[in-house]
Image (tube, rainbow, N blue to C red):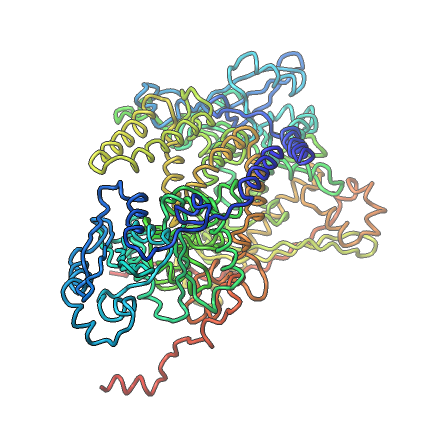
Amino acid sequence: MIRRLLFIILIIINIFTLSGCWDAQQLDNLAVVTGIALEKGSEGRIRIIIQAVNTQAVSADSGASGLTFQKAYQNKAVEGYSLYEAFDNIRFITSTQQFYSHLGVIIIAEDLARERGMTEFLDYFERNAQSRLDSWVLIGRGDLTELMDSPGGIRTIPTQRIQARMETLPTPPFAALQLAEFIKLMQNESLQPYTAGVENKASISAADEPGHGILDGNVPDPLYDITVNGTAVFRQDKLVGWLDKEESRGLQWLRGQVSQVNRVFENPDHPGKRIGVYIVSAKTRLEPQIRNGQIVMQVNLEVQSYLQESQGKANWGETSALSRLEAAQGEQIKREVEAALQKGQQEYQTDIFGFGQAVHRNYPEEWKLISSEWSEIFPAVPVEIQVKSTIRHTSLITQPAEPAPK
Amino acid sequence: MSIWSKWLKAHMASEGTGKTYGNSPAAKQQNSGPARVQPVLRDNWNFLQQKIGSNFDVIFRRFFLDTKSAEEAMVVYIDNLVDQAALYNNVLAPLMYDSRRSREKTSGSGLEELLLNTMLSAASVTAEQSMDQLVAAILSGGVILLVDGVSNAFIIDISLYDQRSISEPEAEVLVRGPREGFTESLPANLVMIRRRLKSPDLIFETMKIGRISATQVCLAYIQGVAPADLLDEVKERLGRIDIDGILESGYLEEFIEDHPFSPFPQILHTERPDRTAACLLEGRVAIITDGTPLVLIVPVEISVFMTSPEDYYERYIIGTVIRWLRYAAFTLSIVLPSLFIAITSFHQEMIPIRLLISISSFRQGVPFTTLTEAFLMEATFEVLREAGTRLPRSVGSAVSIVGALVIGQAAVQAGLVSPLMVIVVAATGIASFTFPAYNLALTLRLLRFPLMLLAGALGLFGIMFGIIMINIHVARLSSFGLPYLNSLSPGPSTNLKDVLLRAPWWAMNERPLGISRNRRRQSRSFKPLTPNSTSGKEADQQ
């Protein structure tokens, strides 16, 4: 009996000591951090801006307590020579515990990424048990303090808005990466990382005259809004340049990341008129070949889409007309891919497309010989692009409606 | 623990030596052999007078038989326990007026046969010699006839007393199913079972338990279906009981259950004769106690507590769905508050961010930790529930108003608790009301609190630990030797189709595993066949 009692006591002691999560945290003491921005501080220090939810403003009862015009978020800026030092300094300026498990967005200023590289910043986020590997790693262009303090819209927390912009569609507007993937690409010898940039830009919806909308008792639309703008291209962990909208699409095609996106291109029958398609499925195959001792990259794309918009007179019910349309779609995709190659391969000379990985996969023996010189070989690799373009259907109508001659 | 059990053993042994646990009141006082009926009426009269004569409601009625010799006779009974009309018509009148003719008809046989065969016209008459038995019979509503010169007494059973009429069982209400429930009267209850199972194999065995109360306890089973060793075990356990009084079957339950320290009920109690009959058909044994409408049923598995008779009366698809609903409610009612505590105070990363923000904004200004908050609310809820059950119905509505307003509305507005906690507590409460078995619901009410403590101290880890401990405990339980989780055991011939599903009646060809050895319920599957197309057409033409 005594043995048994001892046994039970031992078990009870063990549960308390073995459990990893000892400290309870009351929710109202937590500041839920939704995003962090890093920028250059004074004297070589890093300045971090921490954005946390202001739960008092979000509360359903806020009307009653007269806090209606509080911001839904709270930014705190601290400096330190390292991230950890900076985070430690937060304790001096807040009464709440920062909670990083819902950290959705890590924004790193462009100049930091260019000059110091990403490694020393990402280490903290990868190591910390609280932070998640699915936070978006983004490059901030322009003034980050302003970017982090840009209220407006339905989701009033700026970093939440950025996160939503990345996640509402299956394919982000620009090629963006999450922390785990970014680090994976960075560590891979046959790949280079890239990610999207964010910027505070003049809002289209903002009215010309200030005070617009205030009559209804609404907060006026903000003059600036956060936009995802450009894809940052890295060599190893340092930012080397940017891809614009079309080039980013080309990158997404090559990386095989496209699904459920819209594309617009010129109507093959009516120059100047536009055709809109919705791409439902896209397959990318990178097939390197060795011809005469030289690596040639064959890019095979298979694209299927639905017709969504058609300007100009046409009858897409005809097979020949539809084939022309399919060919035009293929051409458009090819143009995008070529534009991306022009920038990434020729100008920045960094293998963000995964060509090295494809060679490694298909010619493992040869890769061993060339891997160390890949950065020299890569810019000269000829690329052959083949697009198998299909338009599955023309949606509800085949011909655009046309006014009858009267 | 060990000291206690040793003391208990020793104590019980010393009590048990040299004594038989007789049930009659006089068994222990009579050291020189039990008293017997004497041929002289006066002696018997004195004996009874001394034994029970000081009771004002005991009637000694002396009269003379209508015979040539006009023997002196006496009936003894308790005033309001006996049907006065029957006493006059079937006992007193024939003996006092009509017996001369009877005597002339019969040829010279003894007075005793004469009385039994031709004079006493009551239906139930037994001859008895033991004075103790006579006293017991008087106390339970019998009429005793003593005749001078006869060394036997007669027990005439014409008892009649007021009893509650049969009504719908309030604790086990069904939408579809019989409306009658057991009453406090044992004979009425037996009738209700007998009417459902008209088989010679349905056996009622009776015994008296309680030195003072001498409560009649009846064992009901179906011979050939209920296993014999189970019967022996039940009888043995019931026979062991030595207590002054049994007022409710709950007394018995605690004396005969397998694991007295477990919070889990191991014996089913029901008010429904239909449910009792169903359990008897499965090979279980019912213990019916006089004076209470609650019948005990042994042995039972945990799944029995989670079924309602309606599962078997309503269509099987619906029965299955409702069963799963109940299982979900079962889980919720144990773990919901503790899950809420664990996740909001330890594992905030598990909550989607928008929910987290909303929970967190509701918690702004709440002065307590989530654990304290939950305990406060749960305790209040339990108090309200208890108040609601105990109060007279007219006051009960006041409690619910106060409960809903004060606890729900005011506490939130005063910032004492967060509205989410109110939702959690309410959901838990409602989930625990879905239980057909009140005693299992009580158990879960109890287990919720340690789980909440564990969750508050250790988070999900604590909940897992608690659940594992409960599982280990439940797996160790048994009810009259039947493993408590018997019906959940896998295997080729299992009960799972009556646990995970409610299989249609034509698919349940066998009785539940582990209880009866005679498992065949029906010889083959009587699945209804769809009429073929030709017969369908004919039907259409008609």
Residue placed most toward the observer, A5 or A126: A5
Q: Quarter holding the N terminus of chain B?
A: top right
Q: Position of residue A78 (x, y in %)?
A: 58, 15
Q: Position of residue B157 (x, y in %)?
A: 27, 59
B265 vs A241, left or right, is: left
Q: Residue furthest left?
A: B97
Residue ID at (50%, 69%): B519
Residue placed most toward the observer, B113 or A388: B113
Residue ID at (59%, 46%): A252
Q: Quadrant of residue A47?
A: top right
B27 vs B310, left or right, is: right
A310 vs A130, left or right, is: left
Residue ID at (49%, 55%): B234
Q: From this view, report whether residue B261 is shown above or below residue B127.
A: above
A149 vs A289, left or right, is: left
Q: Position of residue B312 (x, y in %)?
A: 38, 62
Is residue B182 visible in this depiction of the protein? no
Q: Residue furthest front?
A: B69
Q: Quadrant of residue B89?
A: bottom left
Q: Quadrant of residue A345?
A: top right
Report the number of discs: 0
Residue placed most toward the observer, A230 or B494: B494
Q: Position of residue B100 (x, y in %)?
A: 17, 69
Q: Quarter holding the C terminus of chain B?
A: bottom left
Q: From this view, report whether residue B163 is shown above or below residue A223.
A: below
Is residue B415 visible in this depiction of the protein? yes
